[in-house]
Amino acid sequence: QKEVEQNSGPLSVPEGAIASLNCTYSDRGSQSFFWYRQYSGKSPELIMFIYSNGDKEDGRFTAQLNKASQYVSLLIRDSQPSDSATYLCAVNQLYGQNFVFGPGTRLSVLP
Amino acid sequence: EAGVAQSPRYKIIEKRQSVAFWCNPISGHATLYWYQQILGQGPKLLIQFQNNGVVDDSQLPKDRFSAERLKGVDSTLKIQPAKLEDSAVYLCASSLNRWGEQFFGPGTRLTVL
């Protein structure tokens, strides 16, 4: 079982729609969870992090964490073409390798 | 605040040659990471330093890769000898501590011919 999995892409949504990106992880003791955005040819940049169960909102972005289900998601409201990128989920595990990235989900927002 | 610096940005070498990458983390960041990112994949952690000590190098191919972080600041990653499958982007990141968010440098794109 892979440590961090993400929904396979590419994911295409029309401009103005809500994009939903999902991530599951295997280490039940994981402490913190991060979403990074990576434009083609660029390095990852942090969008949000979340430590506690529930929702965390920052502008058009909402991260949702459910530790019981070992699931974290990122919602992007009012999607814009500039949101088109690969979104990486990263998990800070308690056991094993400390910091693990998922494979990423490529998002395309169509004008 | 200056970001994470890396050099060189691009490097092309022949297989079996050696290459070295340099990273200067954000000032005050105790934790430094080296990742390998192959096209279309997420970053894979190669080695993690806490100050000048190694926390995790379980995925570092130690027969050819080495890394050091002298004085707990700058770090170098070396590959000797390089193989074709080492072609990738090598990313350096730093964080205040091992639990905090990471900030990435621009990366070094390595092509092995």
Image (cartoon, coloured by chain):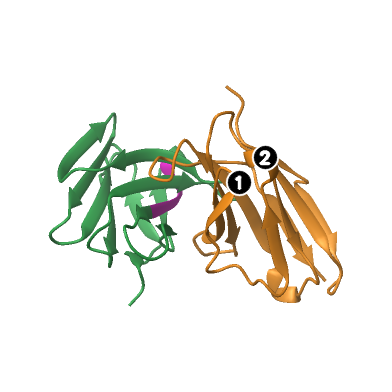
Chain colours: A green, B orange
Within-10-Å neighbours for mark 2: few <14, some 14–19, many 20+ = few
Q: Say which quarter of the image contains residue B25.
A: top right
| Residue at image point 29% right, 33% down | A60
Q: Residue at x 28, y 63 (%)?
A: A25
Q: On the rendered image, what quadrant is the C terminus of chain A found in?
A: top left
Q: Chain of mark 1?
A: B
Residues shaded magenta = A83-89
- Note whether B60 is above or below A106 in the view shown: below
Query: Residue B75 location in percent, x, y?
Result: 68, 46
Is disc 2 placed on a helix, strand or loop?
Answer: helix
Query: Distance between the Cα atoms at labels 2 and 1?
Result: 6 Å
- What is the number of the mark on residue B71? 2
Q: Position of residue B45 (x, y in %)?
A: 53, 60
Q: Is residue A24 magenta?
A: no
The rendered magenta stretch, by its main secondary structure, is classed as strand
Disc 2 or 1, which lies upstream in sequence? 1
Residue type, label 2:
Lys
Q: Residue furthest bottom?
A: A1
**Circles 2 and 1 in contact, beta carbons < 8 Å:** yes
Q: Which residue is mark 1?
A: B52
Percent across and percent down for residue B88 are 66, 63
Closest to the observer, B16 or B99: B99
Residue shown at 27% from the left, 57% from the top:
A22
